[in-house]
Amino acid sequence: MESEDDDPIIQELDVYLAKSLAEKLYLFQYPIRPSLMNYDGVPHLSARIKPKQQKVELDLAINTMSPNYCRSKGEQIALNVDGTCNDETSTYSSKLMDKQTFSSIQAAGNTSRYAVGYYRKGEIHVTPLHGILQLRPSFTYLDKADSKHREREAANDAAGDSSQDEGEDDVKQVTVRFSRPETEQAKQRRAQSYEFLQKKQAEESWVHLHYCGIKDSRSEHEKQYLLCQNQTMSENQELMKSSSEYLQMLMPPSVQEEAEKPVAPSNVLSMAQLRTLPLADQIKILMKNVKVIPFANLMGLMAAGTESIAVLRCIQQVAMLVQGNWVVKSDVVYPKESSSPHSGVSSEVLCRGRDFVMWKFTQDRWVVRKEVATVTKLCQEDVKDFLDHMAIPRINKGWEFMLPFDEDFMKKHPDVVQRQSMLWKGIQSKLDKVFSLSTEDAMSKKMETSSEASSTVITGDQVLNLARAKAKENKARLEKDLQKKKELTKLTSSVTVVADVHIKEEPMSDESMDTSTYESFNNGMVNGVHTDENSKESVNGEKDPVTKELVAFVESTFRRQYVLTMNELKRLFNLHLASLPPGHILFSGISDKMLQETVLNSGCKQIMVPFPPQSTATPEEQKVFALWTSGDTYDKERQTLLELFSKVHRMRRNAIQTRMSQEFGESLSKPQLDKVLKDCCVCYGSMWYLKGTVQS
């Protein structure tokens, strides 16, 4: 009674339930800032709605006269979005960013507890809400600006390459495919796919709405519907409840609330909510989101005091070990009765294809997408999804596993590694039955064997050991050959020349290393294994046949390529060696130093390209050589272009054209510039690089 005296009832109000707008009333939540007001403090607003989806977009005018508004930025954004044209499709008709778009999302799933109250003359009129929409800033204009930028870049590239393609036949390979009849099950899966639903939602057209201000006569008229039209007791029976019933309506049982809560977070993970779940569910949800994770990082996400043994026991139920890291299992990513959003194939087929990709990464760091698509017979989009889960694309190399090999985990948990190895053997046997992997592996091994002759890197110690072993096997033949070549042995006392094998007797160093071996091995030897530089000069001091052959190779190569990195030059030299017959004089061994000196003595020059600090290029990839004087009419233009790239790593075409025009004036035509760029540079995206210097 004392508390009631402290808080007396001042006034009693009648409450009426208005239903005129019960199925039409929405509550919009959107920010009102001074920059979104006109001069009267009222927002300029236009709206549109998709009724079936209950999706609303509002365009709020921006006060461009505000001192806080940057006019130059507004003009630049409008130019990026709409370009120079001004038509009905333009987002900003005033060529100025003068509005901001807000797009709606459902703020509350259940709006039955919410209502709008209208107080008038001692009465409260309550109207139930049909929906609550929260409007957030929409940045679709940035997507439009990006698409415009890509279109302009594509047009510029097409215009720049048109002169290069002039006179050449444009021959393109065309793949013809015939679609199979779609089954009813495939149609149902396609109708449930995310892509189909997005397309269906996009098909619904916007209905433009007319905005009425607060003081508008139409607003005043519609506001009257917030009042109960018939205030008789018969129309308000829903409010005629007992005290207990009324209290239950205000505060429903908590069981209902618990039933409405999701079992686990879906898209956005809350660590606080996640740690309330069992350990197995925590790990499953984490792996489903991250796809690939090292064990140390996974332990860092667990609550303090979680034992690693328990985590290991749970992780093996939802993930597989690949290169010491854990990759989520395919059946977790593609559960039963799901299908591909791209092709509509079943989850069973997707799991087999993804397991094949995971198995390939247990064999190698690199995977080629075309090879996966050929074996699995899946579309490129599905294969790309597999690879995006666990790999990173590298230019001209393929897809590399995204995490480094975790050697620490492999050493600490050999029992887990052994168990996972047995599981992979079982998966491999299943994949072998489906994809005939034994045949594919035999073909790939055969191709690798045939390509080893031009791509395998052999160390100097291996070459020396092979040469010595071969010498011991053919001791008798070597003794006869040694007698025939005693005169040559006296001139080159530091080297014992035996048939086609040079065995160095002095200790080997980084600058001088033996490169000889038996003939069948010579054809597969790569450049980079050093030998004695003095053995390349004859007694008379003239160029010996080896030097002449090397000079001829360098000159012919640079007249075709103009710009080469040391790494690319060595690769081409290896291919050249592979095409030569056994016993050719170039198999006597060519060092990196000798190859580089030959390049510099053949009219070439090293271009000191300033690679960025974060560049991953190797030292050999950063050594760039260019043919400085070729004798044609484009030498000066090429030299000017090369000097530009000695100052910057990359340039836009318009910047190159400006610099070249300053140097040569109007005498430099567009076809001439295209010819010089084609000789020395390569275009990647919107930027131009010297050949071989593009970094992914």
Image: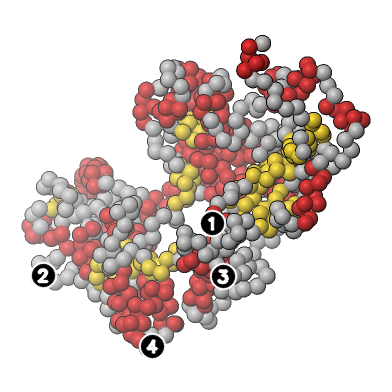
Q: Residue at x 35, y 28 (%)?
A: 408
Q: Earlier in the sequence, mark 3 or mark 2?
A: 3
Front-most of residues 592 and 199: 199
Instruction: Give, as a three-letter code, the residue at label 4.
Output: Glu
Which dot, 3 or 1, sits closer to the camera? Answer: 1
Front-most of residues 512 and 404: 404
- Mark on residue 541? 2
Front-most of residues 152 and 609: 152
Q: Earlier in the sequence, mark 2 or mark 4?
A: 2
Q: Residue at x 64, y 35 (%)?
A: 334
Q: Earlier in the sequence, mark 1 or mark 2?
A: 1
Q: Earlier in the sequence, mark 3 or mark 4?
A: 3
**Residue corresponding to mark 1:** 35
Q: Residues within 10 Å of mark 2 (few under 14, many from 20)?
A: few
Q: Quadrant of the N terminus?
A: top right
Q: Residues within 10 Å of mark 4 (few under 14, many from 20)?
A: few
Q: CA distance from mark 3 to mark 4?
A: 35 Å
Q: Quadrant of the C terminus?
A: bottom left
**Residue corresponding to mark 3:** 95
Report the side of 178 relative to 428 (left or right).
right
Which dot, 4 or 1, sits closer to the camera? Answer: 1
Q: Earlier in the sequence, mark 4 or mark 1?
A: 1
